Amino acid sequence: MSDSTAAVRKHQKSRSGLRGNYLNFAEVLGQSIATIAPTATLALVIPLVFATAGNGTWLVYLFGTVAIIFVAASVNVFTKHSASPGSLYAFAARGFGPGAGVLTGWALLLAYVLTGSAVASGFANYADVLLKYGHLAVPGALLVAVGVLSAWYVSYRDIKLSANLMLGFEFVSIGLVLIVAIASLVHNGFKLDFNQLHLVSVNPDSIRIGLVLAFFSFVGFEAAGTLGEEAKNPLKTIPRALTASAASVGILFVFLSFVEVAGFAGAATKLNESAAPLTDLAGFAGIGWLGPVISVGALISFWACTLGCINAGSRILFSLGRHGVFHSSVGTTHDTHDTPHVAVTITALGVVIAPVILLLAKAGGFFDIYGWTGTIATFGFIFTYLVVALAAPFYLRKRGELKPLNVVLAVATVGILSIPIFGSVVPLPAPPYGYFSFVFLGWLLIGLAWYAYRRASSTVIGDIAEDLNKVAEHFRDPLPEPS
């Protein structure tokens, strides 16, 4: 490498060793969109919501959109002042101190890893569907491993390549779904489904339960925040990306859930009983030949989400490594690629373990694993959102900027988040879903124990406080002493 090239590369490095000032708005937005994985919702989650909410499915997604915009507003209290790869982990620490920050990062790490496991299973499912067109059979565990390994390689090499692939794949996938939706509307003569508009056979309980399921559709919107040191002009780029991803995907979900339910009205197979709802919808609209193409779109969407989860999860793990919560090697970057290569590798291993073991043990199929790992991941996201929403007014009070509206926003956000929290455990679902809240609580207890151990044997609190102050100084945002 020449001296001039080395100088350029050195200039590009951020404070932590990641490649700074590297990603534009579209690339940052791609991280959030891919982690949300809209096509996964359209293919798998909307039918599950319909099973409980019926004609109120579109209303459930409207409520969900409002809820996630409230959460985005709470998160953006922090993103407008500072940015770091720690994302929500760092934000919780700024409001409540290092201990709360570490516990939040611990929960968020599990959320990204298990979301990656869920969508890797979705990838394997659609890979299996496509292979069957050619009468080929490949073990499911191998398909999962191929999906995760390829995502690991891209994440290991370059975050810009990752971001562009994620954004491009999601646009292609969503574009295919919109073609099916428009064809369905044309086939039905653009008639309004008044059973949905009048909420026929819908009751408040079905809306509440449906909202619990629908919330998983939105988690991951905050993933752009993990690119805080790699984004260009992050204090503007990241807040815009979070708001844009939450609002645009929410509108898409409301529209397409209405279209899907209307498209299955009167069909012999109910929406929630369809093995491939998008393919069936294409068939109803007279474009059944598009079925394999739609499967390709779903495949690349699930792969993009797997990549997004590895990107986001690795940066949380990277931050925890830099702060002494884990071994210091976890907090290092690659000499050539400027990526958190050790954290990327560990995160990818975490993503692949659960689905491969479950498939090899024949404990369940692709959809079972998607539901199991996705449910536990949702607890991690909701816990994280709840802590950050509560931390926001405390952070603003320390800055002397707290206003009544900020308190109202925090209270409203906590109130909205309480719906999926209580709806997930009251009444306790039948096994295995009834066990998952306890699995998550066990994970938090392990995190508390590990933090107590590291706190006693290292300088973890000082490292976190020092790093947060360096971030604050970089953005000229003085950080008050942790309370």
Image (cartoon, rainbow, N blue to C red):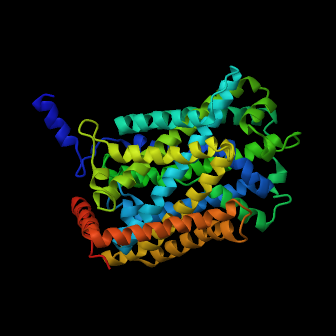
Q: Which quarter of the image is occupied by the N terminus?
A: top left
The answer to whether residue 65 is left or right of residue 58 is left
Q: Is residue 366 visible?
A: yes
Residue at 51%, 63% in the rendered image: 71
Nearest the viewer among 444 and 357 is 357
The answer to whether residue 422 is left or right of residue 264 is left
Q: Position of residue 88 (x, y in %)?
A: 41, 61
User: Is 420 rendered above or below residue 15?
Assistant: below
How many marks are shown on the rendered structure?
Answer: 0
Nearest the viewer among 245 and 390 is 390
The answer to whether residue 364 is left or right of residue 316 is right
Q: Position of residue 14 (x, y in %)?
A: 24, 48
Residue at 85%, 58% in the rendered image: 200
Dividing the picture into quarters, in which one does residue 271 lie?
A: top right
Q: Is residue 33 visible?
A: no
Residue at 32%, 60% in the rendered image: 82
Q: Which quarter of the image is occupied by the C terminus?
A: bottom left
Dividing the picture into quarters, in which one does residue 454 lie?
A: bottom left
Q: Position of residue 4 (x, y in %)?
A: 12, 31
